Each structure stands twice: as C-alpha cells, then as structure tokens.
Image: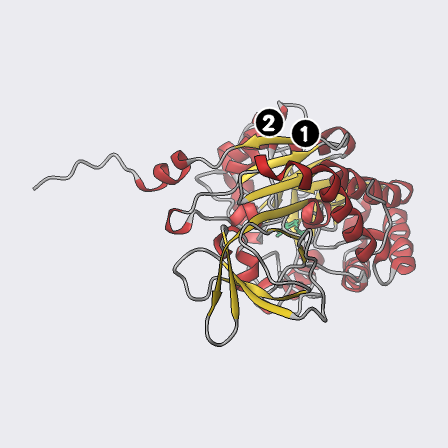
Amino acid sequence: MIRTEASDEERQYDINRCLELSVVPELPRVNTPAFVYLDAALEANLDEYLDFLTPLGVDLLYSVKPCTLDFVVRACAPRIAGFDVSSPGEARLVREILGGTVPLHFTSPGLSARNWGVVAEVADYVNVNSLSMLTWLHANASGPRPRLGLRVNTGHSVAADTRYDPARPGSKLGVPPELFERWVSEVSDPPISGLHFHIGCESSTYGATIASLEWLMRVASPLLAGLEYVNIGGGWLRPTGMDGLHDFCAVIGKLRACGVQSVFTEPGTGLVRDAGLLATRVTDVIDSGAGMVAVVDSHVGHAPETFEYDWAPDLYSPGNEVAADGEYEYEVVGCTPLAGDIFGRYRFPRPLEIGQPFFLHLLGAYALARAAPFTGVLLPSLYRVTRAGELVAVKDAEFSLYRDMWRTHAIDRA
Ligand SMILES: Cc1ncc(COP(=O)(O)O)c(C=O)c1O
C-alpha cells in the first residue's frame, strides 16, 4: 500500500516495500534496463492532489510532458479536469489515447502561424505566449477556435537554477510583468478568456504562486472579473507538504471572489515522479586502482537529469541495501564509453556482486521523456505494477526504435 500525505521518507519506504513484494520475486523475468511504474503511487498522488484541491475549487489538469505513457494518461483521465500539452505532437497523442472528449489545454512558446490550424483543431484552450502572437491570431485566425488565454511571466521565481527558471528576467515564457501591466492599463476589450502563469520547478513552497496571484489581483483586477479562467501552472510537488499552505488557500479564495469562474493547476512531475523507477543490474565490478566501480546495464542517457544536475538518485538495492556507514563504496556507472556516464557514489554493507539489481528512485518524470538510445544501448523496457500488485511487462526494449532513428530514405550515389 502507498500512503497519501506521507512524508517523502515514508513514501520511499512504501515504494521499496511494493518493489520487494511485486518486483523482486519476479526479477528473473525482468529484462533490465527497465522503467517500472507503480499504479498505486500514481493513484496516491492523484488522491493527494484532489483531496486538497477539490474543496478549494481548483481544477486539476495533468501536464503530460514529464510522462505521456498511455496507461498513465488513461489512469488520470477519469479523475481530472483535462490535460496540458505543449506541442501538436503531444496534443495528437493524447487525443489518440483518449478520444475526442477530454479537454486539452495547449501552452507553448512554439505556437506559430504554421501550426495554428492543427492546434486549433485539437485544443480547447490555447494559452498564447506573447502579445505579438495574440495580435497575429486576432488578425489572421478564422473559423471556430479554442478559448484563448495569455501566458504571463509574473516575475516571481522559485527555481534556484536559472536554466530551469521560467520566471527569470528575460525569459521567453510569457508576457513580461511590466509589459503586461502596460497592456492591461491600455487595452479596452481584452481579447482573452483566461490568464496563465507557470513559474515553478520542483517547488516545495507556495510563496511565489501567492506573490504572483497577489500581483495579478493588484494590477489586473477589472480584467480578472471578466475571465473564465486563471491557470496557475505546475512545478509544485507534494501539495499539502508545501510551505505557505494556509496563505495559498486564502489567496485562492480571494481570486475566486474577484469573479474568475475556474482556477486550474497543471502539475506534471508531482503526479508521476515517484511513480517511476529505473531498474538496472550490475554487469561488472572493477577495481580502478583508485576505488571500486560498479558498471550497470543502463546509462545516464536513460535518466538525463542525473547527468545534467549531477544528481545521484536514491538507490534501492535489495539484499545489500545502501547504507551511509557501509564499508564498501562504489562509483555506480553506466555501460557506455562516455567517461562522465556516472550515476553516483554509494556505500553498501557487503561487496557488490555481478547481477545485483538496483532500482533508481524518482525517475517517473522526464527520464523516459528525454531518454536516448545512446551508443545503441536500447531504450529501457517497460513494466507496470498494478494496484493488485501484479508485475506486467508492457513494452520490450526495441531495436526498431533505434534503427528508425538512424535509417533514412536516402539513396547514396557515387
Ligand atoms: C506550461 C507548463 N505547465 C506545467 C508544467 C509542468 O511542470 P512540472 O512537471 O514541473 O510540474 C510545465 C513544465 O515545464 C510547463 O511548462
């Protein structure tokens, strides 16, 4: 069982227990490297968000970009108010998986004159990234069209790393605060049904969201009164474990009192991150002369954030569990020739043996989405643990995906 509203440590304990019961006994038939998704963790996250948001009157969307697996999308669909997509490709895939009725919100700086026709056909809401694009749409778009919202950069950031900060000064994402204030004061009949901001990344505080809403209510209150919706974006993790909970609830109440009909939030990571793990096995143990090295059958191309952030995910290592005071230290590395293909350093109570399984935590978001079959090491196979605890193989590692990436229709001529 995976508890809701548990601490991060309790959640990790529950997940390890679930692996111990449902996956470890089945390891002989698990083709590593593999992503393993736990239905119970996804459901616990949905419960946690909905238990918190529903009484507040905030509608939950799932931003599909961290994980667009069909069974994840299908599990969310009956419980949430729609999906946020960021490209015509994502929109098309979600429509293919779910059919035509589910509400789709499209938010992307990639909206263009060339793809507008496709976007207008599949999306119910389009959050436009700039005033120039809004002007273009009004001059050129004809026929039935989705509700239009305007994405604003509120200028309130939470991300420490500017590369991942959508609200930094100079960001391409949304109308900058000063420009928005000027536009609001000058426009007589705003051609929009909603406002959108997404300012967070793995945030564990509501501070910037509260400050953003207070700013909006200060500079745009007459506009808000006529709007159908405000979308406060995603980027936040465990909903009830965040700082500023009380003030967040209060500011949502104030926003609704302004007359806004619907308030949406669209987390991605928070719903799926701990529901997915990367399973891998030790394939070689090397004495480098300057420390022990354990090679695994995966690589950082399967989990790009480990490399980008220099982030060592927590490991569940059944039978020889990682321990801070463990006598045996290893650098755990991937199986490609890239020298920097390193997952991290870990200590164990006993020496590692070939075949030792590892489960790398918190890889349900953005890992598979950005994974690459670097050097021909195929994308991982996929497994799912159902709520009944059954391990089901849902996709094999396929050479065809790798081959299709490199094979072309070119006819080489001498
Ligand atoms: C517009 C928008 N909404 C929602 C999200 C989801 O954010 P997260 O996965 O951090 O919750 C993103 C992520 O980049 C985004 O760009």
Q: State whether residue 167 appears in this view.
A: yes
Q: Quadrant of the C terminus?
A: top left
Amino acid under label 2?
Answer: Ile
Of the pair 241 and 313, the residue shown nearer to us: 313
The mark found on residue 51 in the picture is none
Q: Give the residue pinned by disc 2.
A: 97
For the residues labelled 1 and 2, the Cα–Cα distance comes to 7 Å
Q: Could you tell whether 114 is left or right of 156 in the image? A: left
Q: Give the residue pinned by disc 1.
A: 74
The local crowd at label 2, few if under 14, some if 14 to 19, many if 20 or more residues have their Cα within 10 Å, is some
Q: Quadrant of the N terminus?
A: top right
Give the quarter of the image for residue 410. top left
In the rendered image, the residue lying farthest to the bottom is 290
Name the residue: 75% across, 54% down.
237
How was the colour assigned to the protein in this rendering?
secondary structure
Q: Residue 27: where, in percent of width, then height?
A: 62, 39
